[in-house]
Amino acid sequence: MHQHTCPHCQQAALSNLAVRWSSRESPASCATCGRLSHVIASTSSGIWVIGVVLLVAAGFFALIAQTPWAGLVGLCVVVAHNVWAWRRVELWPIAANSSQTAARVGWVATLLAWLAVLFH
């Protein structure tokens, strides 16, 4: 299975699943050195958005071609892009205290958003 290279120790020790779920708030931990790294939010969001755009385009193409095979081919393109993009994603190192601060800020922002919705 594909392993991502740690930006700290340069060893292939980060699992694909850990990298896919990594963010500033919950970074991936290297199995070799134990240090933390994450994927930038714009990169992970961009991969998701391109996947959705490709999926919608595949759906339109399947409707225009009037065959489900065109949609299936489009779905295969979406999956292939997703795998390709996540394999070449760049990891950024992050300190543990920065990660904890980002998590706290995220929770405070969420709480403030809920309060704004409830008391609007």
Image (tube, rainbow, N blue to C red):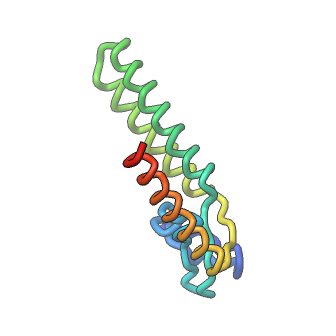
Kindly identify the residue that appears in the image at 49 percent across and 65 percent down.
Answer: 107
Above or below, 50 against 20 in this view is above
Residue 36: horizontal and vertical position, in percent? 61, 77
Direction front: furthest residue: 119
Q: Relative to 5, is 82 on the left or the right?
A: left
Give the residue at x 57% y 76%: 100
Please give the count of numbered marks on the rendered protein: 0
Residue 105 against residue 117 in the figure, above or below:
below
Residue drawn at (52%, 70%), measured in percent from left and top?
26
Residue nearest the viewer, comparing 61 with 73: 61
Residue 30, by quadrant, is: bottom right
x then y, percent, for residue 22: 53, 65
Place of residue 25 in the rendered image (x, y in percent of width and height, measured from the top left): 54, 68
Residue 47 is drawn in which quadrant? top right
The picture places residue 60, in percent across and down from the top left corner, at: 40, 19
* 52 w.r.t. 14: above or below: above
Q: Nearer the viewer, residue 7 or 62?
A: 7
Check the image and name the residue furthest to the bottom.
33
Q: Residue at x 63, y 57 (%)?
A: 40
In the picture provided, is 59 more to the left or to the right than 98? Answer: left
